[in-house]
Amino acid sequence: MGENVTRDYQRHKLLFYRVFERFFGAKGRKLDEKVLDGYWHVLGNYQLDILSKALDNIAVKDDQYLPDAGAIIAEMGLIRSSDTKTIVPVYCPACSCTGIVLVTKVYNGTAYVSAYRCDCANGSRVDRRIGSISSIGGIHIAPEDAIEKRLPITSLEELRAHLKGHVWEDGVEVSMMCADCHKPYSVRHERRVSAAELQTTYLKRTRPYQCEPCFIEEGRRRGAWT
C-alpha cells in the first residue's frame, strides 16, 4: 500500500472518531471506546460529510439511546435521496457500498490495513490510483479459513438475563427473529465481547430487528443504495 493511501486512511479514521465524539457529547453520553470501535467496523468506509449530517439529524431526537448502525445507514440514505448531487451506490457487501475494500495483512508479524478499489460499480467511481482488489486475486470478504468457527449461541431472552459482567472470550452468536419476514436469523460476534455491550447493542435499540435480506430491501426502498 502506498504512503499516500496509508496517510489518507489514518486521517479518515481520526476524522471519523471526531465526528462520533461530537455525537456522543450531543447525546450527553460518555465516550465508549468499544461502542466507537463497533461503529468504525460497520461505518468506517462511509463518506464523512454524509455520516456527520446523519448523526446531527439523529442527535436532535429526544431519546438518549445510541442508534444502531442500521439506523445511521438509513438516515444517510434519506440524506442521499434528498441530495440530487449525491450518487446512490449499488449495494455491495464486499465494500459496504463505499467502493473501498479494506484488507488486513501481516508483515514481519505486524498487522496493517490496506485499502483497495472494489470491482463493483461503486469502485468505478474511486480514485484510480488506488489499486483494484482484483490485483491481489479478487479477495473480497472471504476469510483465510472458509470454515466458520463454532460459537456459543444466545437469544435475546437469555441476553436480558445475563449479568452485565459476563464475557464471551471467543465470541458469541446472537439469535433473534426478523420483524419483517418473521424468520429466525443470527449475528456473529467473532471477538471477545461482554453481555453489557450486547445488551446496549440489541436491547436498547429503537429500530426493529431485521435479517440481512430485509435490511437490504429496506435500504433500497429508502434510497440508501440500488
Image (spheres, helix red, strand yellow):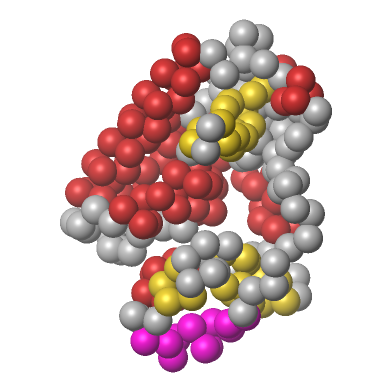
How many numbered marks have been drawn onto this rendered protein structure? 0
Instruction: Residue 100 in the image: state x and y as whole percent.
Output: 62, 28
Furthest residue in direction front, as rendered: 108
**In which quarter of the view is residue 134 placed?**
top right
Residue 119 sits above or below residue 96 on the image: above
**In which quarter of the view is residue 137 placed?**
top right
Give the magenta range. 153-163
Residue 160 sits above or below residue 56 on the image: below
Q: Quadrant of the C terminus?
A: top right
Q: Which residue is rendered at x = 42% and y = 18% of the image?
A: 7
Q: Is residue 183 visible?
A: yes
Q: Which residue is rendered at x = 64% and y = 24% of the image?
A: 116
Instruction: Residue 146 in the image: state x and y as whole percent.
Output: 79, 54
Q: Quadrant of the N terminus?
A: top right
Please say whether residue 174 is one of the residues in the magenta stretch.
Answer: no
Furthest residue in direction top, as rendered: 129
Q: Which residue is rendered at x = 33% and y = 30% of the image?
A: 15
Q: Which sits in the foreground, 197 or 68?
A: 197
- In the visual, does 159 lie left or right of 152? left
